[in-house]
Image (tube, helix red, strand yellow):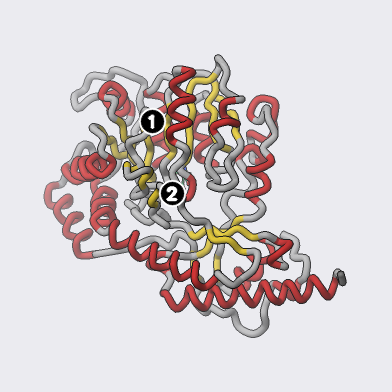
Amino acid sequence: MTIRHPELAVLGGAPTFTEALHVGRPNVLDQDAFLDRVRGALDRKWLTAFGPLVAEFEQRLADLAGVAHCVATCNASVAMQVLLRSAGLTGEVVMPSFTFIATAHTALWEGLVPVFADIDERTGNIDPEHARRLVTDRTAAIVAVHLWGHPAPVEQLTELAAEHDVPLLFDSAHAIGSQHHGRPVGGFGSAEVFSFHATKFVNAFEGGAVLTDDGDLADRVRRVHNYGRGKGEDVAYLGTNAKMTEVCAAMGLTSLENMSELIAVNIARHERYRAGLRDVPGLTLREPRPFDSVNHQYIVVEVDQDVAGVSRDELAAALRAENVLVRTHFHPGCHRTEPYVRDPAKHTPLPLPRSEALGERVISLPTGTGVRPEQVDQLCELIGRIARQGDRVSSAVTPS
Ligand SMILES: Cc1ncc(COP(=O)(O)O)c(C=O)c1O
């Protein structure tokens, strides 16, 4: 990364934060409840394969999302692979490029062809009108992402998928606990996939889950995630081992029990950032749309370099030098990443200017239980100082 003005990287002296602040610092909560559950599994000598903790986790997730079926898995990437395989898809999958690489990789891994659509810059989510231009008779499915926990345009995508009679699937890795028009994420489209990776605010060390109302699809997912077998020895499909362990379910259940409190902490941090950044010109904190409620597990700020006096990359470098380990999700987009970048005609038939532009402007800041409220204030004050210093340096270098 090039820093335009090296003096922006360090404000002088020791870093502002002696201990690093991370984005996605794992929540480790209620260790006693977790360990009691693990002890129960050890006493039962039932460590994996249809154990009671996984069954309870699946039931709680299904209840939360208001769906009939849930299959917990070892992680969300494999959950999505199992889902794509179980849905019997062949051909192309229209999806956003502006997402974590796993969204694309899982489709390619299953022999499908990711075709990337642009986003609505206001939300970062897939633009249904752009997606519409990419749907052809080769399209097998649409995969949308509820980016940063903000629900995708569910109604328009549902309409588009129905018009072309293809399934609509959601990569909901970021979105447990979010709602769209009062309906919980997890119950939209043909199926949704949650992630419980350690960096997600509800975590199971590693974990994922497929949620659906479709009983046949759920049955295939359950078999495919267990070597193609049911509970007995019969093998009905080509399968894999994607099962969640009891120890992961113990962590998932303990996290889930605390989800409301975690969202309350996330909201409190978000409000603190909103107040702290209000007077920093050129920086806009991403807010949910009025008809959505979101889990606020990400603090995403858009940097308008012309107004802020620093670019996103300069701000990121300066903050990292102060021990604030910010992230720049999702840059470059999947279409600029191996192996997709090698075959634009196949994966990127239309330009994606909005994905590219937003990818250069956004920064994710630390939040959740890993950041104390007064550290948020300190961080906002630091960001203000960096921006003012950048402004001074810029105007000194380029006199108007
Ligand atoms: C949008 C998105 N999809 C998929 C995944 C993959 O999840 P997992 O790490 O559980 O495989 C992630 C992980 O961070 C993600 O951010």
Tell me residue 215's x, y (percent): 25, 24
- Could you say which is closer to the camera, residue 321 or residue 149? 149
Residue found 68% across the figure and 27% down from its top? 349
List x then y, in percent, for residue 217: 31, 24
**Quadrant placement of the N terminus:** bottom right
For the residue pair 4 and 399, the one nearer the viewer reads as 399
Q: Residues within 10 Å of mark 2 (few under 14, many from 20)?
A: many
- Tell me if 105 is positioned left or right of 396 in this view: left
Give x and y (percent) for residue 336.
Answer: 67, 40
Residue found at the very far bottom of the displayed protein: 13
For label 1, the SS is loop
279 versus 173 height, above or below? below
Q: Is residue 56 left or right of residue 151?
A: left
Q: Characterize the local packing of mark 1: few (<14), some (14-19) or many (20 or more) Cα atoms within 10 angstroms.
A: many
Q: Quadrant of residue 385?
A: bottom right
Instruction: Estimate the x, y position of residue 188 in percent, counting from the top left.
Output: 36, 34
Q: Which residue is mark 1?
A: 189
Residue type, label 1: Gly
Q: CA distance from mark 1 to mark 2?
A: 16 Å
Give me the disc on residue 149: 2
Q: Look at the image and tell me whether residue 184 can be seen.
A: yes
Can you see residue 343?
no
Q: Residue at x 57, y 18 (%)?
A: 136
Tag shown at residue 257: none
For image coordinates 57% across by 52% down, the residue present is: 329
Q: Note whether 157 is above or below 21 in the view shown.
A: above
Q: Amino acid at mark 2?
A: Gly
Q: Is residue 300 left or right of residue 118?
A: left
| Residue depicted at 60% across the width and 40% down the height | 334
Q: Quadrant of ligand 1?
A: top left
